[in-house]
Image (cartoon, grey):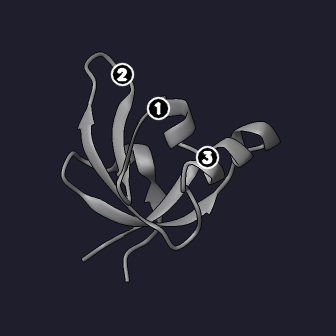
Amino acid sequence: MSAPLNLDMLKPGESATIAAVHTGDRTLFYRLAALGFRVGKRIEVIRHARFAGPLHIRIGSTDVMMRRREAMQIEVQPVA
């Protein structure tokens, strides 16, 4: 079993399972939950924008563009 890492560390095409959401902002936490970012959900990185721009994330059938600072707050467990 691999050590947990943050969502922003995944490369395009890699999948993982959400292990925890560590945001101190309750509004952001609820917004992410409404988009499907819940513990145990499978997530895939589609692409990284240039120059430290946002990440294109797919969770279920939903595609989301996410800031890297928000992605850093989502702990994931890589899928083998």
Does the residue at mark 3 contact the one at mark 2 (Cβ under 8 Å)?
A: no
Q: Residue at x 52, y 42 (%)?
A: 72
Would you identify the image quadrant in which residue 36 lies?
bottom right
Query: Badge 1 is on which residue?
Result: 68
Q: How many marks?
A: 3
Which of disc 1 and disc 2 is earlier in sequence?
A: 2
Q: Residue at x 43, y 50 (%)?
A: 7
Q: Mark 3: give few (<14), some (14-19) or many (20+) Cα within 10 Å.
A: some
Q: CA distance from mark 2 to mark 1?
A: 7 Å
Amino acid at dot 2: Ala
Numbered badge on residue 27: none
Amino acid at dot 3: Leu
Does the residue at mark 3 contact the one at mark 1 (Cβ under 8 Å)?
A: no
Q: Residue at x 38, y 60 (%)?
A: 60
Query: Badge 2 is on which residue?
Result: 52
Does the residue at mark 2 contact the one at mark 1 (Cβ under 8 Å)?
A: yes
Q: Mark 2: give few (<14), some (14-19) or many (20+) Cα within 10 Å.
A: few
Amino acid at dot 1: Arg
Q: Is residue 25 visible?
A: no
Numbered badge on residue 32: 3
Q: Is residue 43 above or below residue 65?
A: below
> SS of the residue at dot 3?
helix
Q: CA distance from mark 3 to mark 1?
A: 14 Å
Q: Pick whichever, 1 or 53, lies toward us.
A: 53
Residue 27 in picture, x, y percent from top left: 78, 38
Which of disc 1 and disc 3 is earlier in sequence?
A: 3
Q: CA distance from mark 3 to mark 2?
A: 21 Å
User: Does 71 sit left or right of 27 as displayed?
Assistant: left
Q: Is residue 48 above or below residue 23?
A: above
Residue 25 in picture, x, y percent from top left: 78, 38
The residue positioned farthest toward the top in the image shown:
51
